[in-house]
């Protein structure tokens, strides 16, 4: 093995075999365990949009309280991403990857039993801490175990779990609607079942060998690499390449060699979350405002929208390593924003136009930044600050989500549906400009090549 002078004093000489390895069952299981956590996030974020249809007549929230109910999880995710991301860089990925879902289970149960608006807001914010941590950790772990030629597909597949969770949420919400006012509690509580299964399964997950190497645990890293690759790996090779690294502060994200990556990921992910979450949390409500008649029809249409989101993510996975990350992100922003603009300008749209343009908007937004956000944030930051970079990016995106979700009900009430959609389209166009100006291409490059 060569001993290059890259981060970790030659870290790529240790994990080069992992970068060039063929796809294996080991890596597939790791991706699945990560994607299941993202699935829970997609489910929880999406199910509240259906649950709100019954929460509103039970708790009678004001427009501001309604915004807080929707935004509470994202507020918690901001805190969880920063806290657990930093802890993961300090103490390892594996331990944090189990505790984050324990948070989720406890506070999801309490949310389903909430007796008033205040309790609902508080408990959803606390369960959001666990979800935010999973955001920060899931793609970090997948990236650090993935071969170079498969990394884009595996991380996109990880994100795909979100859209599967969203579709499951709308299907379950639709199935439970006939139960009446109490159904929203069952909608929220069902998320506990897969969460417990994932917690148990993640006990199998090994620590990231990259993290172990950077933190001087060469023998453990060698054993894990040996298991992942199916070939002998000498601890002496790991030890020879290891070079202790000083503790890296978050200010490292603004160093000269990383600041462009930071500005790009923070900027385009903020724009995506601003556009997506405000609309997504209130999709059935928005569809009714756009002309659909009745609660059931709105949720049925939401199922179709979620299916189109999942299809967009699937197409993105197939094209990720062909077209590249930057073109996919730019195309997604541009087309989705144009479709939102069209809906706003032609308000009120016919039912046919609504059920054509809105699902297409969802498809392209997911095809682009809705899939590449996780990929870019895990690829661009070097190992020494990857989880911190991922966590900070998640936190910034949560700021966009919180602002968007909180003010969306008020925007609809004061600006009207047409102007609200035009405003969101403008934010999407800003995301497109950020991608074109600051975006970089990372396809078919190792993590260490990108770091250099």
Image (tube, rainbow, N blue to C red):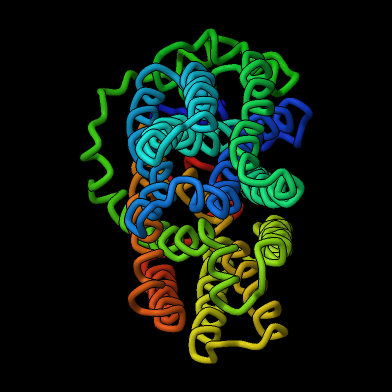
Q: Residue 382: which quarter of the image?
A: top left
Q: Is residue 320 left or right of residue 60?
A: right
Please provide percent x and percent y for residue 250: 25, 36
Is residue 196 in view? yes
Q: Residue at x 65, y 75 (%)?
A: 292
Which of the two residues, 68 or 20, is positioned nearer the viewer here? 68
Please provide percent x and percent y for residue 134: 50, 33
Please provide percent x and percent y for residue 242: 41, 19
Q: Is residue 205 left or right of residue 344?
A: right
Q: Residue at x 68, y 28 (%)?
A: 194
Is residue 5 in view? no
Which of the two residues, 110 or 23, is positioned nearer the viewer here? 110
Please state the total of marks drawn on the protein image. 0
Which of the two residues, 63 or 274, is positioned nearer the viewer here? 63
Q: Which quadrant of the rendered structure holds the N terminus?
A: top right
Q: Residue at x 54, y 91 (%)?
A: 346
Q: Which quadrant of the rendered structure holds the C terminus?
A: top left
**Is 322 rendered above or below residue 158?**
below
**Is 87 rendered above or below residue 263?**
above
Please provide percent x and percent y for residue 108: 52, 29
């Amino acid at each position: 093995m060569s001993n290059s002078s890259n981060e970790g004093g030659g870290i790529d000489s240790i994990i080069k075999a992992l970068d060039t390895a063929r796809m294996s069952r080991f890596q597939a299981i790791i991706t699945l365990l990560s994607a299941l956590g993202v699935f829970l996030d997609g489910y929880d974020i999406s199910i509240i949009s259906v649950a709100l249809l019954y929460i509103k007549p039970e708790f009678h929230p004001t427009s501001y309280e309604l915004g807080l109910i929707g935004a509470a999880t994202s507020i918690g995710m901001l805190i969880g991403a920063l806290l657990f991301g930093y802890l993961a860089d300090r103490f390892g990925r594996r331990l944090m990857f189990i505790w984050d879902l324990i948070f989720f289970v406890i506070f999801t149960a309490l949310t389903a039993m909430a007796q008033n608006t205040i309790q609902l807001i508080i408990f959803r914010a606390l369960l959001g801490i666990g979800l935010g941590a999973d955001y920060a950790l899931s793609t970090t772990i997948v990236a650090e175990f993935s071969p170079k030629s498969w990394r884009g597909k595996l991380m996109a597949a990880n994100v795909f779990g979100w859209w599967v969770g969203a579709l499951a949420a709308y299907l379950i919400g639709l199935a439970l609607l006939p139960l009446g006012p109490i159904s929203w509690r069952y909608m929220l509580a069902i998320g506990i079942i897969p969460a417990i299964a994932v917690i148990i399964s993640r006990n199998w997950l090994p620590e990231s060998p990259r993290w172990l190497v950077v933190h001087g645990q060469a023998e453990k890293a060698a054993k894990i690499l040996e298991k992942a690759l199916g070939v002998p790996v000498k601890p002496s090779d790991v030890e020879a390449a290891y070079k202790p690294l000083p503790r890296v502060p978050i200010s490292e994200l603004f160093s000269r060699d990383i600041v462009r990556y930071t500005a790009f990921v923070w900027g385009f992910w903020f724009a995506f979350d601003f556009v997506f979450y405000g609309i997504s949390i209130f999709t059935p409500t928005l569809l009714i405002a756009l002309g659909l008649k009745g609660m059931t029809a709105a949720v049925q249409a939401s199922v179709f929208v979620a299916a189109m989101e999942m299809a967009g993510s699937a197409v993105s996975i197939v094209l990720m390593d062909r077209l590249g990350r930057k073109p996919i992100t730019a195309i997604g922003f541009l087309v989705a924003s144009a479709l939102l603009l069209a809906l706003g300008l032609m308000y009120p749209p016919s039912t046919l136009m609504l059920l054509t343009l809105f699902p297409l908007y969802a498809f392209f937004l997911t095809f682009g930044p809705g899939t590449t956000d996780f990929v870019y944030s895990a690829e661009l930051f070097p190992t020494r600050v990857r989880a911190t970079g991922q966590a900070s990016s998640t936190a910034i995106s949560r700021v966009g989500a919180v602002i968007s979700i909180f003010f969306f009900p008020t925007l609809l009430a004061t600006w009207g549906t047409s102007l609200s959609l035009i405003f969101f389209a403008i934010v999407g166009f800003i995301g497109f400009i950020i991608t074109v100006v600051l975006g970089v291409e990372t396809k078919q490059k190792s993590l260490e090549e990108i770091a250099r």
